[in-house]
Image (tube, rainbow, N blue to C red):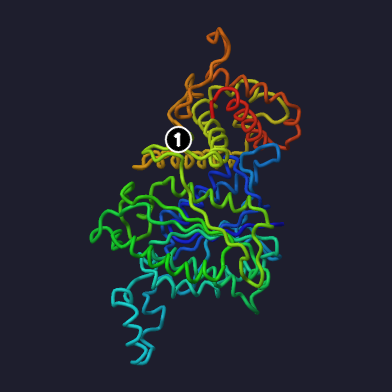
């Protein structure tokens, strides 16, 4: 079973995984038998992390009760690390643990009080008093010098050991990090080094050394409000830190051919300003198009054939580098501003899932006596759906809608879909693409919600749905089929 291990580092890593999860739910398929997300963030209470964790857990539960080959929705299996291997068990833990971080100051973590005078003097040159007195339970607050020391311990962690034990020669690795903070900028090169330099007693070290590894590094794309009051993070230092990190990466990552594929992405920082927070629950940033674009780099990496990503003796033979761009620099991005390849990947799946979400939210109850809901072996009324499945799907869909609305509210917004449409306007959801009205006497034809229901009724008649095993699977499959037909016939994508 070919696995994709995703190391998501820091808050940016969590937000990109969140975007990837919504893409997979919508029908964007990754060429992997299972996706294994490992979120590395010492800030246990990070709002971005806890929200992504819930979304991953909901996706996994929906997949296990509702996925079938007949449906494009929720098309990739997700496994958490604890479930893999011979001694695997059911787990909802997505976090890569680092021992000794919680409830410790940095000086305690490095054993500063136990050093002799000479080593204390050297340490004081490398780390300020503010660094030494920093608590690490809310991350590294933009200090990669602290992060590099702490995250170097990850190779000794149970999470790294478990990953190594279950890693196979056909598996791949992808690393997500920002370049302008503390956790991501420090964690990316260290995790990469630990994988490429793995040696006994690390299990499967040869497979790790020669793994096909991709990464996306996220350049600054927002400013932070509240320096000195709400946060100690100064966004004025982002560019300086980015330049320093890029210089290091050019020598120690690109220079030694550690990566098969490195993706760069960023935006003008003045385009987006967020409320600052040093961590914990207050660090819960609104979604941004940059994070969605970063998630697309994972899709691209997994679509790349093995022959294009050769590795010998721990070095990528033909390292590849990519940037992301749109067709036109505009304040509001819709599907039309995306390149042909990106449009092909995103437009249909997101439109289909938005149609699904909007119908369940606004019309499912009023239409539950229609043929699509009452016919066949597995009826789609609430009493026939698994109650927990129904609740999980409702929660997941709320997160999906919030994600789209948050991206649309950024200064540089991504607003391809109008999530306020319903009733006769439901097929006008794609920005700039009104519903196509067929026929010379179009007022006599079915349109809007009436057409949507007629397609559902017609799709439900397919005999293949009678053998799906349960109503959960049928629900996803019927709506995946119907929304694909609707998008083709009624929406200009």
Q: Is residue 130 left or right of residue 387?
A: left
Q: Quadrant of the C terminus?
A: top right
Judge left or right: residue 8 versus residue 305.
left
In percent of the image, x 47 and y 60: which residue is there? Answer: 177
Crowd class of label 1 (few under 14; some 14 to 19; many from 20; radius 10 Å)? some
Q: Quadrant of residue 106?
A: bottom left
Screen quadrant of the N terminus:
bottom right
> Quick one: 414 or 374, which is closer to the camera?
414
Q: How many marks?
A: 1
SS label for mark 1: loop
**Residue 391 horizontal/vertical position (percent):** 54, 40
Q: Write the residue at 59% across / 43% down.
A: 28
Residue marked by disc 1: 334
Q: Is residue 399 above or below residue 129?
A: above
Compare residues 204 and 412 and report the one nearer the observer: 412
User: Extreme left residue here?
Assistant: 228
Residue 198 picture location, percent across and down? 61, 75
Q: Residue at x 47, y 58 (%)?
A: 217
Q: Position of residue 251 (x, y in %)?
A: 48, 71
From this view, report whether residue 487 is shown above or below residue 161: above
Residue 441: % across, % down? 55, 7
| 399 shown above or below 309 | above
Q: Is residue 115 above or below residue 245?
A: below
């Amino acid at each position: 079973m070919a696995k994709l291990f995703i190391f998501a580092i820091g808050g940016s890593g969590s937000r990109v995984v969140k975007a990837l999860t919504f893409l997979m739910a919508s029908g964007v398929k990754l060429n992997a038998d299972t996706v294994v997300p490992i979120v590395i963030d010492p800030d246990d209470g990070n709002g971005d992390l806890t929200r992504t964790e819930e979304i991953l857990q909901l996706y996994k539960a929906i997949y296990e009760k509702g996925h079938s080959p007949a449906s494009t929705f929720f098309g990739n299996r997700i496994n958490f690390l604890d479930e893999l291997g011979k001694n695997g068990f059911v787990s909802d833990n997505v976090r890569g643990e680092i021992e000794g971080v919680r409830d410790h100051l940095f000086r305690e973590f490095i054993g500063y009080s136990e050093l002799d005078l000479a080593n204390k003097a050297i340490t004081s040159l490398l780390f300020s008093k503010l660094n030494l007195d920093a608590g690490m339970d809310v991350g590294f607050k933009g200090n990669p010098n602290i992060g590099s020391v702490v995250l170097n311990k990850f190779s000794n962690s149970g999470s790294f050991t478990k990953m190594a034990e279950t890693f196979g020669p056909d598996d791949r690795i992808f690393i997500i990090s920002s370049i302008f903070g503390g956790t991501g900028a420090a964690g990316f090169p260290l995790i990469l080094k630990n994988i490429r330099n793995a040696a006994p007693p690390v299990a499967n070290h040869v497979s790790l050394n020669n793994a096909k590894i991709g990464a996306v590094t996220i350049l600054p794309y927002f400013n932070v409000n509240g320096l000195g009051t709400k946060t100690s993070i100064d966004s004025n230092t982002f560019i300086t830190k980015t330049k320093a990190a890029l210089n290091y990466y050019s020598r120690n990552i690109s220079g030694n051919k550690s990566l098969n594929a490195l993706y760069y992405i960023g935006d003008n920082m003045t385009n987006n300003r967020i409320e600052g927070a040093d961590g914990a629950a207050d660090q819960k940033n609104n979604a941004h198009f940059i994070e969605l674009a970063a998630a697309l780099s994972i899709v691209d990496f997994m679509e790349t054939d093995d022959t294009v990503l050769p590795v010998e003796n721990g070095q990528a033979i033909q390292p590849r580098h990519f940037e992301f761009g749109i067709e036109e620099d505009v304040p509001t991005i819709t599907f039309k501003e995306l390149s042909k390849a990106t449009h092909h990947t995103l437009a249909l799946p997101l439109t289909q899932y938005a149609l699904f979400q909007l119908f369940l939210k606004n019309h499912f109850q009023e239409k539950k006596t229609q043929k699509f809901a009452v016919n066949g072996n597995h009826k789609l009324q609430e009493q026939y759906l698994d109650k927990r499945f129904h609740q999980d799907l409702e929660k997941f869909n709320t997160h999906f809608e919030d994600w789209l609305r948050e991206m649309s509210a950024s200064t540089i917004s991504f607003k391809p879909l109008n999530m306020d449409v319903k009733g006769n306007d439901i097929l006008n959801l794609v920005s700039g693409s009104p519903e196509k009205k067929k026929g010379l006497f179009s007022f006599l034809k079915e349109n809007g919600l009436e057409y949507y229901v007629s397609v559902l009724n017609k799709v439900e008649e397919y005999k293949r749905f009678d053998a799906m095993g349960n109503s959960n699977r049928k629900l996803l499959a019927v709506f995946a089929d119907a929304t694909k037909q609707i998008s083709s016939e009624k929406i200009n994508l």
